Image: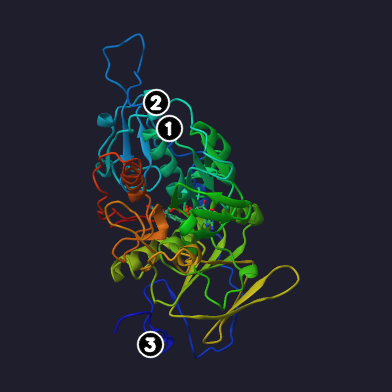
Amino acid sequence: MTGAPTLATTCAALPPAGAVACDPAKPASRLNVAPTLATACAALPPAGAVACDPAKPASRLEMPDASDPGQSPWELYICRACGLIYDERKGDADSGLAAGTRFADIPDDWACPLCGVTKSDFEPYVMEASARSSGRNGQVRKAAGRRDAGTVIVGAGRAGWQMAEALRARDASMPITMVTSCNGDVYDKPMLSVAMARGVTPGKLARETGSAAASRLNVRLLENTQAVRITPANRQLRTTRGTLRYRQLVLAHGAESRLPQQFPPSLCWRINHLQAYTKFRSLLGNTPQRIAVVGAGLIGCELANDLALAGHAVTLIDIATRPLAASLSEAQSRQLLEAWAPLPIVFIGGVQVRAIRSADDAGSKQLITQCGQIFTVDHIVVAAGLQTPNRLASGAGLVWNNGIAVDAGTLATSQAHIYALGDCISVNGQVSRFIEPIGRQAKAMAAHMVGDAATPYQHTPVPLRIKTTSLPFSL
Ligand SMILES: Cc1cc2nc3c(=O)[nH]c(=O)nc-3n(C[C@H](O)[C@H](O)[C@H](O)COP(=O)(O)OP(=O)(O)OC[C@H]3O[C@@H](n4cnc5c(N)ncnc54)[C@H](O)[C@@H]3O)c2cc1C
């Protein structure tokens, strides 16, 4: 039998070591979950520690020392798992690499400061020859008419900005407009689930403001603006700030966290963007809180781990009887539970949430399971998977196959002049919601869009690093 286990079967199943199973023999028991606060905070790195500065378009030809022209230029290396760029010129203070440390001199067991894969998962990173400095045309061409927005990119996440970088590298003068519902700040989303362990405050997560990135790349940024409808027949995009006429349209609007209907949005957090994360962290303050994390997949487990390391009392709930059941073996799930033993995490397996309600005027919430258990907590974080919103795509008549269906080599959608990349797409029905492919998608697509010869995008498996920092896994 495949699919999610039913309550009847999972409740009866034995929980793995360290887990707490749903106990149908105790209907309506009240668990005011407040596991003891562990001392794991002592293991945190010093506040303010940050990962090395990724994906800045530092030139590969920058010389180490003008007075020593004999030295070879600084090189950049990209992590194939998360897209972090190691810049030899800057080193990585966070992981003990001084500025000027050559990649060749880094020990083999050095781990990516963002996602933790090892040195062998890095490869040389070559910036496209920048059209900005190539003199192809130093000035951004004016859009043809008042409403002609040139190439329009929807979304300012990793995919949106990588697309802007890749297009600008190929064409210095193409007018580019970026429409995004967020403020456009550039940040590494994988950091959201490890920021506390790394001692990084939300204010330090943005690497560059949206407006600074926009001016660096000569992009017109319409931040806090929602794209609402595409009309391919006349190449128009309606937004909450007016209608734009596009020459080419790039959909990079990502996926959204699923919120099953029993979870009222006003009572639940979903951590999929920096803005929500920043609000969540400011609400947590410095006092340990009782937090229920619903969903023990990749994001749920990483968040639970990080929150517990910061001293919060976490109840991690899943319909499966063990954490990361879809990714780890039973033995690995057990090891993870053992690694969590000193932390204030309680894993409750084999349960399904029936309802959520407010518990009192002080903001407590209650989470009620199908078998009648009640958990009273301060916050509920739902990590029940991602889904691509299909409103824009279906309005435009784009072929949909578990996401916006794109051509496997060019990432063109089924409508002329519309492309898509990142978390919102599917290639042959498969989604791949990871950082690493996005840069390659952007490069292949940009070449195709400007008519340059290019190697088609090729989808290759991404090395998966589960950033449960108490016990990380590489798969
Ligand atoms: C907590 C967490 C940890 C992760 N860890 C890892 C990891 O370790 N390794 C890894 O490879 N991947 C990881 N991922 C996944 C990775 O971060 C994503 O695959 C990647 O960031 C997706 O980028 P994107 O630009 O496609 O989408 P997003 O980052 O979601 O960007 C979408 C953009 O579109 C905008 N937008 C959405 N709808 C509209 C609209 N209608 N109109 C205008 N703008 C819109 C949004 O505001 C946003 O700017 C993690 C994800 C999370 C949430």
In this view, 351 is above or below 193: below
Task: Give the secondary structure at mark 3.
Answer: helix
Q: Name the amino acid type tagged 3.
A: Thr
Between 215 and 260, the one nearer to me in the picture: 215
- Looking at the image, tell me whether mark 1 or mark 3 is earlier in sequence order: 3
Q: How far apart are marks 1 and 3 (CA)?
A: 50 Å
Return the residue found at the far top.
67
Q: Where is residue 442 in the image (x, y as percent from the top left)?
A: 36, 45
Residue 263 seen in this snapshot: yes
Q: Distance between the residues labelled 3 and 2?
A: 55 Å
Task: Give the secondary structure at mark 1.
Answer: helix
Residue 348 in the figure: left or right of residue 115: right
Residue bearing mark 3: 9
Q: Name the amino acid type tagged 1.
A: Ala
Q: Position of residue 340 (x, y in %)?
A: 43, 62
Residue bearing mark 2: 99
Q: Which residue is found at the position 38% from the left and 87% from the top?
A: 9
